[in-house]
Image (cartoon, grey):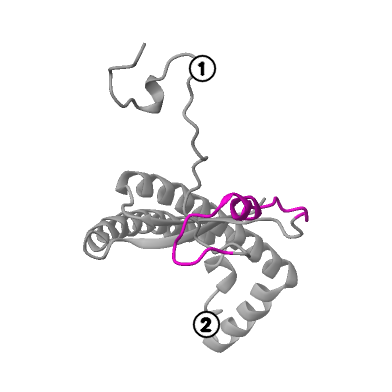
Amino acid sequence: MTDTRGQQSPYETYGDEQPEREPYHPPQAYQAPGGTQGGQAPTGQQAASAVRLPRTGARTTPRTRKARLRVAKADPWSVMKVSFLLSIALGICTVVAVAVLWMVMDAMGVFSTVGGTISEATGSNESNGFDLQSFLSLPRVLIFTSVIAVIDVVLATALATLGAFIYNLSAGFVGGVELTLAEDE
């Protein structure tokens, strides 16, 4: 019985009928040691020698993965929230630092010494002069520092939010800031 279907693709063969074909070898980017010339297909012996062997040596330095990213947009709402919290923390640190500094200077006697010198320089026979110790009392200094800290919170939050809007406008023109991030293993 003869097959009248004509030539078939290798996938349409039935049973044990397998056409004998050489295995597919993709083109090599680098020439094998006994290499072929002019892009000819390697013969069986050359193909066996062109098989890449696995590396046996262990890597001594850890591999670092790198990713190049671009900050295209800064969300003004999130910038405002973060800058508000950071400026509140900075304001609290400022008030605490001024209070500690005032207590240290008062314990060292700086206000009494400088106050005595100023009252002698500004005083006359009828009056004692300017009293620096009552002017620079701790409650007065802390109230002044708190007012400055509140103004700083408002200004820092507004400037950071305005900076986010300006960054978004400029990133639209030039593409944003490019960062290269590396991951250590």
Task: Please name the residue shown 73% across and 67% down the image.
Answer: 107
* Magenta residue check for 159: no
Quadrant of the rendering where the N terminus is positioned: top left
Q: Nearer the viewer, residue 122 or 32?
A: 32
Mark toward the viewer: 2 or 1:
1
Q: Which residue is mark 1?
A: 16
Query: How many other residues sit within 10 Å of disc 2, few (<14), some (14-19) or many (≥20)?
Result: few
Q: Which residue is mark 2?
A: 126
| Rendering coords of residue 161 (x, y %) | 31, 54
Q: Tell me the kind of residue under disc 2.
A: Glu
Query: Badge 1: how crowded within 10 Å, few (<14), some, or many (20+)?
Result: few
Q: State the image coordinates of residue 101 (x, y, percent, origin top left).
A: 64, 65
Q: Which residues are magenta?
A: 35-58
Quick one: which residue is furthest to the top in this view? Answer: 1
| Circles 2 and 1 in contact, beta carbons < 8 Å | no
Picture coordinates of residue 68 (x, y %)? 45, 58
Residue 176 in which image quadrant:
bottom left
